[in-house]
Image (cartoon, rainbow, N blue to C red):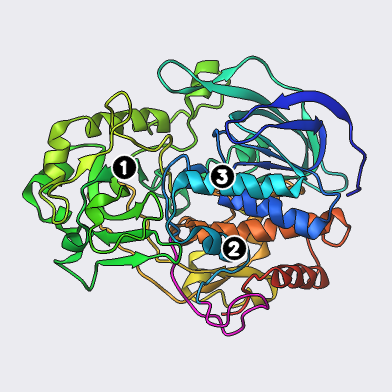
Amino acid sequence: MLRKGLILTAVCVFSIMMTSSVRNTNYEIVIYGGGPQAVSTALMAIAAGGKDTDVLMIVPENQLGSIMTAGKQNLFDVNYYKSSKLPPGLPAGYEGSQGGSMFRFHRDLGAVFPPDRMAEYFAGLLKASGQVDVLYETDLTAVETAEAPDKKDTRSIRSVTYQRIKKDKDGRYAFKGKDMPPVKADIFVDASESGRLLRLTGADYHTGREDTGQDQLQMVATLMYKVKGVDAYRAIEPDKLAYGVAYSKKGSFQFWAGREAYTTPEVVRYNQENPYFRLKAYNAGEDGYSHVGSDTTKIPFWMNQQIIYEVDARKTYRDLAMNNGLYPDSKGLDPEEAREMALKELKNPLYWEMLRKLPGLEKVEPVLDERGDPVVGDMLYLRESIHARNRPEDPRKHALTKQDVMNGGEGLYDRRIGIGYYNFDSNTYKKHENLTNPLHEPWYVPYETIRTPEVDNLLLPGYAANIDSYSWSAMRVYPNLIMLGDAAGAAAGLALQHKFNLESPEAAQLRRLQETLYEHQAILEK
């Protein structure tokens, strides 16, 4: 991979967050997606690749942060674990299972944060680098690939084509105008929650839990909604062993409670009778840094409570409207359609009467917008979409498997890029399935997790990572994804300097990658 000069064009990018311009149609790295893992990829690529690294981010949303900002899922799902060997730069008592960018994001934002603050923070980091162009409200329409020289059944991405998208009168995104000039790059990264870039390459993948032989269902989705009048301490009173409250060092507040949803008659009836929706035990994150003490009724919270079944994260209304062949033929709901259905539930006064049967929510009310509608996420909190997998002849179907995570990643140490840790928490796939969320010891995550063997210049630190569905139920949380983003960025930056082979790195190159990650505070030891 060679450093190259810039080919200038006059393509402008407009954003509510910042204004930048696509300086050329040749970049060294193109990142698809705008979530925290996409931001960590970009920042680490610059850190590892140097001041000449030029990056383009193609972001379907109108802000950075994806589900955590546009979707209002405003808290990091952190399980604390103290490593036996912390890298220089982390506090001596640090107990996060991931360091690197996750350490810095958590330090600057807190464990729970206002979504708009995260979007501003990410935009500021990228703008300060001076090396990242961001295309907001933009989506891919095509990917050009070619057979990789001297590599059987392996392709390289040559370019991607994109269009601007805009919300129509019904609030759904539609493609606007025509394709922009194709953008070429040395390295491409799918850091998205949809896996769209991987899909467009034609590389093999499985959908949801298809790898288990059951069906293509994906984990349930959630529409986050904003509430007021919540008494958090009353909510946790029934079960202080299972429930809890926490403050971040930034002064923001979160709590988790609500198992009474499984025994309260009105909620039980709702959960049984509604084909698509269920109320779960919830967690709630403050929309602010209030430093409020005992009276939580004064502060607004984003609620992670409403479960939506049978959502297909691959679907977008814009593909259906364009009739471009990318809209899957499945029974699953389009996420935008599911969001509209969920919002309709929230507009029903009976829904709020039902919530008020739960402890601590006796006086809960929705926060309303200027139209008098409940304030909700602009997109769903999607938990799963597709997963890359190894070639059919490979006895290891995925780079990270259930067996790996159950035994702590034994045998993966030499190829590790970080540590994964969280409960195995799918929130279920289908109505009336048993809900389990066991917790095991942390596990080592191998480099191949962010690769597909079929495309030699594509990295996958997003939902399309090379992980089986069981492992994904824990790897899906953003601290783990941010760790994958750090590794993808470091690998890309080193590859641009001819110091790392993305497709098949040698042992010495993997050690160099690990050293680079360690220098940037990544945790590599359990």
Residue furthest to the left in view is 265
Q: Which residue is drawn at 35% across and 46% down?
A: 220
Q: Which residue is drawn at 73% across and 46% down?
A: 455
For label 1, the residue is 226
N-terminal-most mark, 2 or 1:
2
Disc 1 and disc 3 in contact, CB within 8 angstroms: no
Q: Is residue 65 magenta?
A: no
Quarter the C terminus occupies: bottom right
Badge 3, how many Cα within 10 Å: few under 14, some, many 20+?
A: some
Badge 1, how many Cα within 10 Å: few under 14, some, many 20+?
A: many
Q: In what element is the residue under mark 3?
A: helix
Kind of residue sitting beneath label 1: Lys
Gap in Å between the C-alphas at discs 1 and 3?
20 Å
For label 2, the residue is 104
Q: Which mark is residue 120?
A: 3
Q: Where is residue 301 in the image (x, y as percent from the top left)?
A: 31, 49
169 up-or-down from 194: above or below: above
Q: Is the magenta stretch mostly helix, strand or loop?
A: loop
Kind of residue sitting beneath label 3: Glu
- Res 7 quadrant in image: top right
Q: In this rendering, does residue 4 appear at all?
A: yes
Nearer to us of marks 1 and 3 is: 3
Give the residues in magenta. 77-94
Kind of residue sitting beneath label 2: Arg
Q: Where is residue 341 in the image (x, y as percent from the top left)?
A: 29, 29
Q: In this view, does 72 lie to the left or right of 445?
A: left
